[in-house]
Image (cartoon, rainbow, N blue to C red):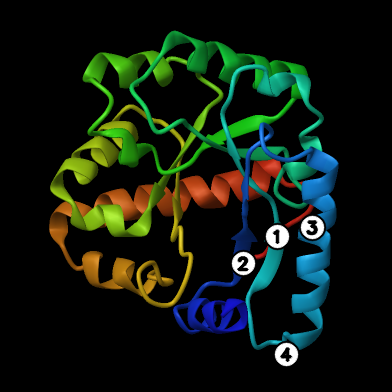
Amino acid sequence: MALRMLWALRRQGVHTVALTPHFDVQQEDPEAFIHRRRAAHAALAPRIRPGGAPRILLGAEIRLTPGLSRYPLRQLCLTGSDLLLIELPDRPFQRWMLEELENVTYSLRVTPVLAHVERYLPLYTKDNYAALLSFAPAVCQVSTDSFGDRHALRLIKQLADDGRMVLPGSDCHNLTTRPPNFSELARLNEKRGVRDYLAYIQQCAQYMLRTHFRRPAAR
C-alpha cells in the first residue's frame, strides 16, 4: 500500500513526500514512536526503486494535548527542518490550545505547522480562528481536496489575503477513501478563482524550503 501510494504521488509530479504518522503523547512514549517509525521505514526503504518514488522526509502528525511542550519532540520535526506538524483536537476551540501551541514553539524551538486547518470550520467561529492565528509563527497546512469546497476555499483565500504561510498537503491515508490527489490541483488550477491562491501557496512552499531546512529538500 505504501509503495503504491508513493508511486501514485510520483506520477502526479510530487518529488518530495513527508511521511507523518499520527502520534499522541498520551498513548505512546516519543522514543517508542520513533523506534516504531524507524522500523517501518527500514522495511519500506529497500523496496523503493531509485527514481521510482519521491524523496522521503520523516515526521509525525502530533496531536495537541495539554502539557505537550514538556516532551522531547524535536526529533519529530520533518527531516532536516524545524517544522513540527501539529493536529488540533477535534473539538471546539479552547484558550489552552493557543497557550500550549505557544509553549511548544518556544520551549522546543520549533516552527508549528497546523494540520488541515480548514477541517475545523464546523467547530470554530471566526473569532476562534482569529485567536488561533494571532500566533504569528504558526504555519497553516491545507488539504488538497479542500480547494473544491467553497467554505474551505473561502478560509484559504482569507489566509492568503492576510499573508499567512499556507502549505498544501494531500493528507492521503490509502488508495480508496483517502488516496493521493495532488493531480486534482492541476484541474482546479484551470479555475480563475483558484489559480492565484494555488500560485501563492506554491510560493509559500518554496519559501519554507529555502528558510526552514538545513539543506535543500528537493522540489
Q: Which mark is residue 57?
A: 1
Q: Which residue is mark 4?
A: 49
Do the CB atoms of the residues marked 1 and 2 lie less than 8 Å apart? yes
Q: Is residue 75 left or right of residue 26?
A: right
N-term-proximal mark, 3 vs 1:
3
Q: Residue at x 22, y 33 (%)?
A: 122
Q: Which mark is residue 16?
A: 2
Residue 18 placement: quadrant? bottom right
Instruction: Estimate the spatial distance between the alpha carbons at disc 4 and disc 1, rounded to whole Å.
Output: 16 Å
Q: Amino acid at mark 3?
A: Arg
Instruction: Estimate the spatial distance between the alpha carbons at disc 1 and disc 2, rounded to whole Å.
Output: 7 Å
N-term-proximal mark, 3 vs 4:
3
N-term-proximal mark, 1 vs 2:
2
Q: Position of residue 207 (x, y in %)?
A: 56, 45
Do the CB atoms of the residues marked 3 and 1 lie less than 8 Å apart? no
The image shows a total of numbered marks equal to 4
Q: Which mark is residue 122?
A: none
Single out the residue that lies furthest toward the front: 27
N-term-proximal mark, 2 vs 3:
2
Q: Position of residue 178 (x, y in %)?
A: 39, 67
Answer few, some or many: residues within 10 Å of disc 2's Cα (few below 14, many 20 plus, some between 14 and 19): some
Q: Residue at x 46, y 50 (%)?
A: 203
Q: Amino acid at mark 1?
A: Leu
Where disc 4 sits, the SS reads: loop
N-term-proximal mark, 2 vs 4:
2
Do the CB atoms of the residues marked 2 and 4 lie less than 8 Å apart? no
Answer few, some or many: residues within 10 Å of disc 3's Cα (few below 14, many 20 plus, some between 14 and 19): few
* Residue 150 to residue 36: above or below: above
Instruction: Estimate the spatial distance between the alpha carbons at disc 2 and disc 3, rounded to whole Å.
Output: 22 Å
